[in-house]
């Protein structure tokens, strides 16, 4: 069985590499995903709404993983094909080798090295 840091890395490697079967095996049946745009959506909705976003990326770099017995924080930096760069941190709650919950915290965005403010919703 993988440790929580390895599980977190494996999930984001599957996302970036578009290996949905690998991601499916890492997510618990009761998986939920919460972000500033999503309130505890389930697995099916995660794959419908979030999974296709990997197609918009030109790079995806894992910067750090901090794990404990309950899960892992992972920080990554993304560059989109449109030239927007941003960094997010997520907390993955992990139990019995599978991700039960993801909570996403958005960082600042940049285009051509300049800060891009996000519009309030």
Image (spheres, helix red, strand yellow):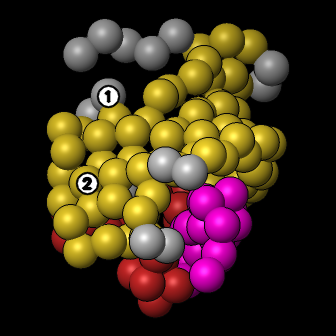
Q: Is residue 49 above or below residue 96?
A: above
Q: Is residue 49 above or below residue 62?
A: below
From this viewpoint, which residue is outermost toward the front?
Answer: 69
Q: Quadrant of the N terminus?
A: bottom right
Horizontal side of residue 121 vs 110, given as left or right: left
Nearer to us in this view, 14 or 101: 101
Quadrant housing residue 48: bottom left
Nearer to us in this view, 62 or 50: 62
How packed mark 1 is, by other alpha carbons closer than 10 Å (few <14, some 14-19, many 20 or more), is: few
Residue at the image position 61 percent from the left and 60 percent from the top: 4
Residue at the image position 45 percent from the left and 58 percent from the top: 94
How packed mark 2 is, by other alpha carbons closer than 10 Å (few <14, some 14-19, many 20 or more), is: many
**What residue is pinned by disc 1?**
36
Nearer to us in this view, 96 or 108: 96
Q: Residue 24: percent from the left, percent from the top?
A: 40, 81
Q: Is residue 115 above or below residue 14?
A: above
| Magenta run includes residue 8 | yes
Q: Secondary structure at mark 2?
A: strand
Q: Quadrant of the C terminus?
A: top left
Q: Residue 37: percent from the left, percent from the top?
A: 27, 34
Q: Residue 63: percent from the left, percent from the top?
A: 80, 42
What span is in magenta?
A: 1-19
**Of tags 1 and 2, which is closer to the observer?**
2
Nearer to us in this view, 79 or 93: 93
Q: Is residue 74 above or below residue 2?
A: above
Q: Residue 67: percent from the left, percent from the top?
A: 65, 47
| Magenta run includes residue 45 | no
Quadrant housing residue 87: top right
**What residue is pinned by disc 2?**
32
Most common SS among magenta residues: helix
């Amino acid at each position: 069985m993988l440790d929580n840091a390895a599980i977190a890395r494996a999930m984001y490697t599957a996302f970036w590499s578009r290996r949905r079967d690998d991601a499916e095996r890492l997510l618990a049946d009761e998986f939920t995903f919460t972000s500033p745009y999503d309130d505890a959506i389930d697995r099916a909705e995660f794959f419908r709404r979030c999974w296709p976003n990997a197609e918009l990326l030109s790079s995806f770099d894992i910067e750090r993983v901090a794990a404990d017995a309950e899960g892992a924080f992972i920080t990554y930096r993304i560059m989109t094909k449109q030239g927007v760069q941003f960094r997010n941190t997520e907390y993955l709650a992990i139990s019995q080798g599978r991700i039960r919950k993801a909570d996403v915290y958005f960082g600042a965005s940049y285009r051509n090295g300049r800060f891009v403010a996000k519009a309030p919703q």
